[in-house]
Image (cartoon, rainbow, N blue to C red):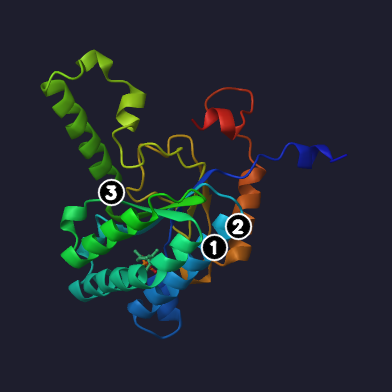
């Protein structure tokens, strides 16, 4: 028999969301330019995707570029856009062969045409895959997401498809960028900051947060396992008093 401490562990999260922070500081600590850190960050992301799929995580959402990241120097932004194009070109085959579905969230119309094309191709190619959904947030902001949802709902009211009284939480959720996916159970933020930086504001209402000082390029599978163990040891009550299991409460 398992001791109580083990019996009471929660199942693994269905949906893990990650704010990958610390590439720039890691590069600096190596005496290199920030872009060197972003390239190392891609290797960490790749390893995490593999580890998450092995752990049977259903959805992995990575914050790759925020709506605020446009404020960075043009050379860094340009380097990141090129890096995203390169990564998609290089990795989509492997993702597809491993049964991973790719989905992008964010203000696509603000992105370079070539990147938008690669994103659309990758989504179309992997649309039928069911092992894990990898959501990449690019030019994404939580405020943007809510504004978009409100616009779409308002358009439906205007066209007479729904009445204002029909608007409830489920309806709003169905119009957000993560529509159709379970809300994140666990949010990991690397790099030492303890804030959510305009990530998934609607979706993180009951998410467990895990903050680690580890810089993103050093966040390896061992660190990921630690984050999962931490999650599993927590009690999730969703505003009630009795611990609830994710399978019921996460919906
Ligand atoms: C955070 O570090 C990193 C970013 C905002 C850039 C994007 C992330 C990657 C290149 C890794 C994964 C990529 C893909 C395509 C999945 P920072 O620059 O904010 O670091 P700092 O806080 O130390 O300055």
Determine the secondary structure under disc 2. helix
Vertical relation: 58 (above or below) 226:
above
**With 38 as the anchor, is 60 left or right in this view?**
right
Q: Quadrant of residue 28?
A: bottom left
User: Are the two marked residues, 2 and 1, in contact with CB atoms closer than 8 angstroms?
Assistant: yes
18 or 59, nearer to the observer:
59
Vertical relation: 48 (above or below) 78:
above
Counting other residues with Cα less than 10 Å from the Cα at mark 1, is it few (<14), some (14-19), or many (20 or more)?
A: some
Q: Nearer the viewer, mark 3 or mark 2?
A: 2
Disc 2 and disc 1: Cα gap in Å? Answer: 6 Å
Per the rendering, the mark at residue 54 is: 2
User: Are the two marked residues, 3 and 2, in contact with CB atoms closer than 8 angstroms?
Assistant: no
Q: Which residue lies furthest to the bottom in this view?
A: 31
Q: Mark 3 points at which residue?
A: 141
Q: Position of residue 22 (x, y in %)?
A: 42, 67
Residue at coordinates 64% horizontally, 28% vertically from top-left?
243
Disc 3 and disc 1: Cα gap in Å? Answer: 26 Å
Q: Which of marks 3 and 2 is nearer the N terminus?
A: 2
Q: Position of residue 66 (x, y in %)?
A: 29, 56
Q: Mark 1 points at which residue?
A: 50
């Amino acid at each position: 028999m398992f001791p109580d401490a083990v019996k009471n562990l929660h199942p693994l999260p269905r949906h893990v969301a990650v704010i990958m922070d610390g590439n720039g500081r890691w590069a600096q600590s190596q005496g290199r330019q920030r872009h060197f850190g972003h390239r190392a960050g891609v290797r960490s992301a790749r390893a995490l995707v593999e580890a998450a799929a092995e752990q049977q995580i259903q959805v992995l959402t990575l914050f790759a570029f925020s709506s605020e990241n446009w404020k960075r120097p043009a050379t860094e932004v340009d380097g990141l856009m090129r890096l995203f194009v390169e990564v998609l070109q290089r990795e989509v085959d492997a993702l597809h062969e491993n049964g991973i579905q790719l989905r992008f969230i964010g203000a696509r119309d603000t992105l370079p045409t070539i990147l938008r094309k690669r994103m659309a191709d990758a989504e179309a190619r992997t649309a039928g895959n069911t092992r894990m959904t990898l959501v990449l947030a690019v030019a994404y902001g939580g405020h943007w997401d809510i504004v978009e949802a409100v616009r779409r709902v308002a358009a439906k009211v205007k066209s007479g498809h729904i009445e204002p009284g029909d608007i409830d939480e489920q309806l709003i959720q169905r119009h957000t960028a993560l529509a159709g996916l379970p809300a994140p159970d666990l949010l990991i933020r690397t790099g030492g900051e303890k804030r959510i930086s305009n990530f998934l504001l609607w979706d993180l209402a009951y998410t467990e947060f895990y903050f680690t000082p580890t810089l993103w390029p050093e966040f390896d599978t061992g660190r990921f396992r630690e984050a999962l163990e931490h999650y599993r040891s927590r009690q999730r009550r969703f505003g009630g008093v009795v611990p609830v299991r994710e399978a019921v409460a996460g919906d």
